[in-house]
Image (cartoon, rainbow, N blue to C red):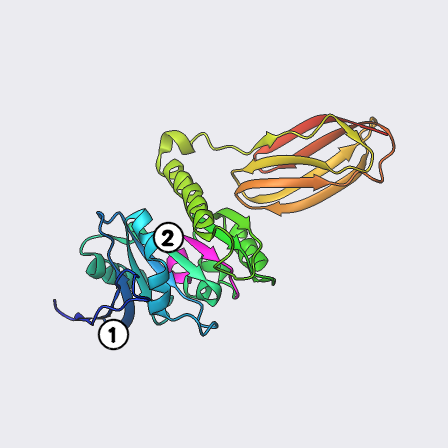
Amino acid sequence: MKNLVFILCIAVSGDLFGQAIATASWTGKGVKVDYALYRPNTAIQEVLIAFYDDADPAWRFETWAQELTWLADERGALLIAPSSDVKHMDSAKLEAWIRFVSDSLTLDRVKFVTLGRGVRHIDGLLGEECAGLIIAPSDTISTWLSGKDGVIGLIDSRKGDSAQAVMKALAKNGTWLFSKMVIGDHPYYFDQHKEVVLDVFAKMDSMLLILKDSSLNAGLRSTVLETGPEVLRQGKAFELSLFIAEEGVFSFQVLDLSGKAVQSKKVFLGKGRHGIKLPTKDLDWGVYKMEVDGPGILVKQKLMIRG
C-alpha cells in the first residue's frame, strides 16, 4: 500500500492467562503512529481508541490495551491504543489510519476511552464528534474543538477539579454528557468498575440511537422528569429532576403569593439529566410558587412550606 508502512510485532500478553495483543506501526502522509492492537473473536462493530494515563508508571499503551480487552470483547470492538499523541492529526489522516487498521471502518464507527491524563489526546476525536468514555480525567480539553451533539460519558473517580472542568467544557459546547461519580481507592479499579463502564456505555449507545433516528430526536424536548413535592417541611431542600435538550442558563425561583421572588438561583445546564436542589431553610411557612425557566422549558408548580 503506497505511503503506508505496517509493522506487525510479536504478540504480547499482560499475564499468563491474558488475551494476546500485538504492537504495530502505521505511517502515512508524514505521520507515524505506534500502537497496541487487539482483535476480538466476534465480528467487529466499531473501533475503540484507548488513551492511557502516562502520569502513572503502572500504565503503558500495551498494558492499557491489555486491560481493556474485556471491553473490546463485550462491544465487538477493534481496540487500538496509541503510544503517542494523535490529537493533531486532521480528519483525513485519522480516517486513513482507521481504515488501514480496520480494513474498512470509518470515523463514524470510532469511539474512545481515556484514563487520567489520556484525556488531553481526544481533542481531534471530539472535533470529529466521536463518542467516548472519559475515566478519572487529570487534565483538561480544548473546549472549542468539541462538536455539537457529541455524546460523551465521564466517570469521576479521582479527587481533584479536572473532572468538573472537563464536564463544564463539554456542557458549554452542546455535548450530551452522561456522568457518574464513584468512590474508590484507585481511579480505574474502583468497586465493580466493569459494570460501571458498561452502564455508562449503554446510556451513550441509547442516546446515539436516538440522535440517528430523526423520528425520535425530533421529539427531544426539555422536560421535568421528577417533580418536587407540593408540601415540604421547612428546612428541607426542594428537589426535582430535569431532562435538558438544549444547553443554556436556567433560572429557578420561589415566588410568594404577590409574585415576588424570595429565593432564586441561576445555573448553566448542559444536555442530559440533572438533579436540582433549592434550600428552603430561610423561607417562612406558607404557600409559594416554584418556577423553572430556561431554553425550551417553563414550569410552574405550587409549593407549601410547613413545620
Amino acid marked by disc 1: Gly
Q: Residue at the location (45% across, 44% down)?
A: 199
Q: x, y (%) of residue 169? A: 54, 56
| Residue holding disc 2 | 130
Q: x, y (%) of residue 262? A: 82, 37
| 280 sits to left or right of 145 | right
| Residue holding disc 1 | 30
Q: Could you tell me how far apart the alpha carbons at marks 2 and 1 are, in whole angstroms?
A: 24 Å
Q: Residue at the location (40% across, 38% down)?
A: 206
Q: Nearer the viewer, mark 2 or mark 1?
A: 2
Query: Is 305 rendered above or below residue 148?
Result: above
Give the extent of the magenta segment: 123-138
| Count of numbered badges drawn on the protein | 2
- Secondary structure, mark 1, is loop
| 221 sits to left or right of 234 | left
**Along the line of sight, which residue is nearer the eye, 64 or 297?**
64
